[in-house]
Image: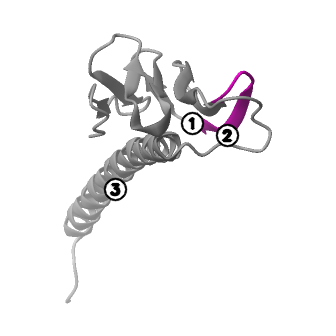
C-alpha cells in the first residue's frame, strides 16, 4: 500500500497551521505599523498646511479682523485621540477636525503658526515632539516641530 500515515499527515498539517499563524501575525503587525506611520504623516501634512496658510497670510472670509495665526491642537490625547486645525482671528474658525481611531497621544499640545512667516509658538517655547501610540501594539511614531518651524 502506498500513502501517508496519520502521523505524517498530522505533522504536515501542524507545520502548515504554524506557518499560517506566523504569517497572519506578521501581517497584522505590519499593517498596524503602517497605519501608525500614516497617522503621523497626515498630522505632519496638516501642520505644513497650517504653516503655509499662515505664512501666506491667507484667511477665510468668515475671519473678521486681522489674522492672528493658525493653531494645530491635540484636543484629546486619550484614544481615540483628536486634533483640530483652527484659523485664529478675533474669532476662531475650525478648519479641520481629525479623530485618530486606535491611537493615543503622549501629551496634549498646541502649535501656533504666526502670520506672514513670523514664526511658530509652542506650549513649551522650544521644539515640540508629538508622540503617537498605537493602542494595540504599543508602537510609537513621532512628529517634531522646531522653533524655526521645521517639521520632521
Q: State yes or no: discs 2 and 3 in contact (Cβ < 8 Å).
A: no
Q: Residue furthest top?
A: 124
Sooner in the amino-acid sequence: mark 3 or mark 1:
3
For the magenta stretch, what is the residue range?
A: 88-100
Q: Nearer the viewer, residue 28 or 94?
A: 94
Sooner in the amino-acid sequence: mark 2 or mark 1:
2
Sooner in the amino-acid sequence: mark 2 or mark 3:
3
Is label 3 in a helix, a strand or a loop?
A: helix
- Give the left or right position of residue 64, taking residue 137 as reference: right
Task: Tell whether position 146 is magenta.
Answer: no
Q: Residue at x 33, y 46 (%)?
A: 33
Question: Quick one: quadrant of the N terminus?
Answer: bottom left
Task: Tell whether position 92 is magenta.
Answer: yes
Please tell me in which quadrant of the rendered image residue 128 appears: top left
Q: From the image, tell me which residue sits under label 3.
A: 27
Most prominent secondary structure in the magenta stretch? strand
- Give the left or right position of residue 120, taking residue 101 as reference: left
Q: Residue at x 26, y 28 (%)?
A: 146
Q: Is residue 147 above or below residue 96?
A: above
Amino acid at each position: 500500500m502506498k500513502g501517508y500515515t496519520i502521523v505524517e499527515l498530522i505533522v504536515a498539517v501542524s507545520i502548515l497551521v504554524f506557518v499560517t499563524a506566523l504569517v497572519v501575525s506578521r501581517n497584522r503587525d505590519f499593517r498596524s505599523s503602517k497605519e501608525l506611520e500614516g497617522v503621523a504623516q497626515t498630522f505632519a501634512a496638516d501642520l505644513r498646511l497650517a504653516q503655509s496658510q499662515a505664512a501666506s497670510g491667507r484667511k477665510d472670509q468668515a475671519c473678521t479682523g486681522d489674522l492672528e495665526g493658525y493653531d494645530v491642537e491635540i484636543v484629546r490625547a486619550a484614544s481615540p485621540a483628536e486634533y483640530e486645525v483652527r484659523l485664529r482671528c478675533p474669532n476662531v474658525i475650525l478648519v479641520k477636525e481629525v479623530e485618530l481611531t486606535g491611537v493615543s497621544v503622549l501629551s496634549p499640545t498646541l502649535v501656533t503658526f504666526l502670520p506672514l512667516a513670523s514664526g511658530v509658538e509652542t506650549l513649551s517655547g522650544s521644539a515640540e515632539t508629538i508622540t503617537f501610540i498605537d493602542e494595540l501594539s504599543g508602537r510609537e511614531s513621532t512628529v517634531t516641530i522646531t522653533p524655526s518651524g521645521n517639521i520632521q
